[in-house]
Image (cartoon, grey):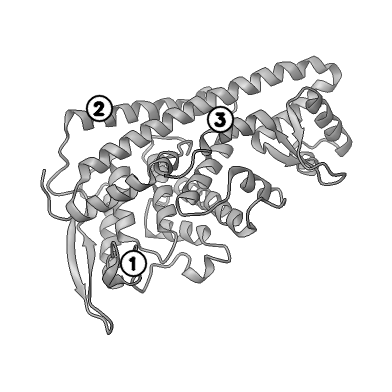
Amino acid sequence: MHRQPPGQYVTVSTAEQPYRALVPAPLPPVPPVDWSPQLRRRFDDALVALGRLDAITALLPNAALLLYSFVRKEAVLSSQIEGTQSSLADLLLFEIDEQPGVPVEDAREVSRYVAALERGLALLRRGLPLSGRLFGEVHSVLLDHPRGRAKAPGEIRRSQVWLGGTRPANAVFVPPPADALPGCMAAFERFLNDQPEPTPPLLKAALAHVQFETIHPYLDGNGRLGRLLIVLQLVADGVLHEPLLYPSLFFRAHRSLYYELLNEVRLRGDWERWLDFFAEGVQASAAQAVATAHALLALVNQDRDRIATLGRAAPSALAVHQAMQRQPLTTSAALVAATGLSAATVNKSLGNLAGLGIVAELTQRQRGRVFSYRRYVELLNAELEPALS
């Protein structure tokens, strides 16, 4: 189907050189999405995969522990799309006040993504709808780090931004001028809250991600906040009870195509190719999350059986083992705080777990040693390793 670009180009005159900026039309698209049989199947498959992922929340005994790790995976993946080099191990080390293997600022930036998602979920659960106010609060948390504080955290931009090129006149894409943002954001907020008519949740998440990236309402952090919005939207609409999905896994693996399809919507209104890609990504990411969850559960159960052979030492070792599912890279001091056990008991338990090959000591030093739930970390890291494309 041939469409005009989904919006209106406006010419902005400047002292240097005039440029054209796109003011996107309100959602949903006009004319409506052309639902081919293949596209319908894609969305059906994605919804089935999301249902299986959501079921983990009720079916698995350690779902809360998985949530801790899966949120951090999404934070790492989404930040890597933007060029941050921090790994999952770097983030986990930073969270226990250990030196990561990359500059501390990279790890701190990723940690703010985790905090931003947690703020967004807390606001949703307090009854605040997806709205400009919620975005502002989440954005202020996301950019609460030294590199972000100069980029007006939580404030809609008052100046022009552009993507690619050295100035708006030679940019790959120019989002709407600052004076068009209030109207764009008001229409966007109405769409997210099913006004004037409801939109199926997965379709809404797919359309909203492109629209947010096109509006680009902030000076920085739009890409990360736009991907965070996908998960917040699915939770807000009841598709997921917890944010176990990490869609940035698929977007990072296909980064060039991801950006190309976002731009094809802006240039030619090609929503159908984007929707096909988005649904495939959600299905693949949800299926991978389910597989990883079951692999982690199998590992935990196997290790728990081995710990049971420790006899009288088993209960304290099991408590440490439980805590390390939440923080698979940790210190004895952190485990003392997490378990309520004495330092001597924690250290003895760590020795027992190391003897079983469950825990490995990483630092080879006398004090402040860092311990790893080795296989657990390997399973979490398995899909984070492929190089960016």
The image quarter containing residue 379 is: top right
Decide which of 145, 174 is in the foreground and name it.
Answer: 174
Q: CA distance from mark 2 to mark 3?
A: 29 Å
- Mark 2 or 1, which is nearer the eye? 1
Give the class, few, some or many, for how many residues have Cα within 10 Å of label 2's Cα (few <14, many ≥20).
some
Residue at left 65%, top 19%? 301
Disc assigned to residue 63: 3
Res 276 visible:
yes
- Give amino acid for label 2: Arg
Callout 2: helix, strand or loop? helix
Q: Earlier in the sequence, mark 1 or mark 3?
A: 3
Q: Earlier in the sequence, mark 2 or mark 3?
A: 2
Left or right of 329, for residue 71: left
Q: Position of residue 215 (x, y in %)?
A: 30, 60
Res 202 visible:
no
Residue at left 38%, top 67%? 156
- Give amino acid for label 1: Gly
The image quarter containing residue 12 is: bottom left
Q: CA distance from mark 1 to mark 3?
A: 45 Å
Pointer 2 residue:
41
Pointer 1 residue:
165
Q: CA distance from mark 2 to mark 1?
A: 38 Å
Residue at left 33%, top 30%? 46
Q: Position of residue 341 (x, y in %)?
A: 82, 35
Q: Position of residue 38 (x, y in %)?
A: 21, 29
Q: Earlier in the sequence, mark 2 or mark 1?
A: 2
Quarter of the picture holding the C terminus: top left
Total marks shown come to: 3
